[in-house]
Image (cartoon, rainbow, N blue to C red):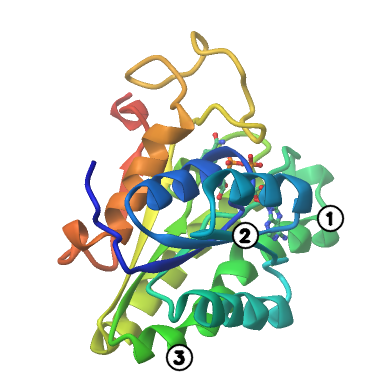
Amino acid sequence: MPNRFEAKVAIVTGGARGQGEQIVRTLAREGCSVVIGDVLDDQGKAVADDLGASVVYTRLDVTDPTDWAQAVAVATSTFGGLDVLVNNAAIYRRQLLEDETVADLDKILAVNLHGPFLGIQAVIPAMRARCGGAIVNVSSLAGTTSYPAHGSYSMSKWALRGLTRTAAIELAPSNIRVNAVLPGNIRTDMSPTTGSADTPTGLKRQADPQETANTVVFLASDDASFVNGTDVIADGGSLLG
Ligand SMILES: NC(=O)c1ccc[n+]([C@@H]2O[C@H](COP(=O)([O-])OP(=O)(O)OC[C@H]3O[C@@H](n4cnc5c(N)ncnc54)[C@H](O)[C@@H]3O)[C@@H](O)[C@H]2O)c1
């Protein structure tokens, strides 16, 4: 088993379930110490308990700057520093534009866009103290195209790619890489479909969360040391038409 993250420390938001849980488990398997940040306390604690002392859970509502400061403090006080941030947490809702209110839009933007923005701000000092780091923002295929009733979600995921590029430019002098992953349809609680035959992907199936987690973990690792400010699409080929 590779040990790409030995002596490294990560914060993974939305790590209590779904793709985030698989990111946590994969990082831990590869030697990383991990802080799971989520609002699902029982599920987050259960994942941490299952993985032993190298993984801890802290309540982190990504919309709250105080929670972010606390999560970074947990990483540095428990594990001695911080090298990786995975902005994975998000919420999803299907709604036609004509039915959507500004309040609906703001709820999505608060988690999916303000969350990663606050997270990046919060981790910069700790990563600079380690002379570098890696940030992976989980966007979506809806961040490079869109679908009916995906207005606010799609806006949030497109904007996250802009944040990714700006952060990559500004943080490159600090040796902090920032990239985005654009997954296609993943089999999780969030996923709009549970079947596989009706997905339009070239591979004609949903992703197992481990498959897209692997892409995130690659970008977080030193194997991606020259990959910066870009998007990696992990969609099984659905954009091929
Ligand atoms: N499932 C898909 O088909 C799909 C496709 C493309 C992209 N994505 C993206 O992948 C990522 C993971 O999604 P998933 O499919 O595992 O969904 P999920 O709903 O299973 O997991 C999302 C996690 O984020 C957490 N979360 C929500 N609001 C939060 C908040 N305010 N603070 C902290 N945590 C919060 C949830 O509690 C949950 O643990 C998301 O960014 C999502 O947009 C998913």
Q: Is residue 26 left or right of residue 96?
A: left
Residue at horizontal 22 percent and vertical 47 percent from the top: 2
| Residues at circles 2 and 1 in contact by the CB criterion of under 8 Å | no
Return the residue nearer the eye: 105 or 37.
37
Name which residue type carries label 2.
Asn
- Residue at which label 1 appears: 101
Position of 94 with respect to 29 (left or right) is: right
Front residue of this view, candidates 124 and 232 = 124
* Label number found at residue 125: 3
Q: Is residue 118 above or below residue 221?
A: below
Q: Which tag is nearer the camera, tag 2 or tag 3?
A: 3
What x and y, as percent, mark residue 192? Answer: 64, 28
Q: Residues within 10 Å of mark 3 (few under 14, many from 20)?
A: some
Q: Sequence order check: which comes first, mark 1 or mark 3?
A: 1
Mark nearer the N terminus (2 vs 1): 1
Residue 63: % across, % down:
71, 70
Q: Nearer the viewer, mark 2 or mark 1?
A: 2
Q: Position of residue 87 (x, y in %)?
A: 52, 61
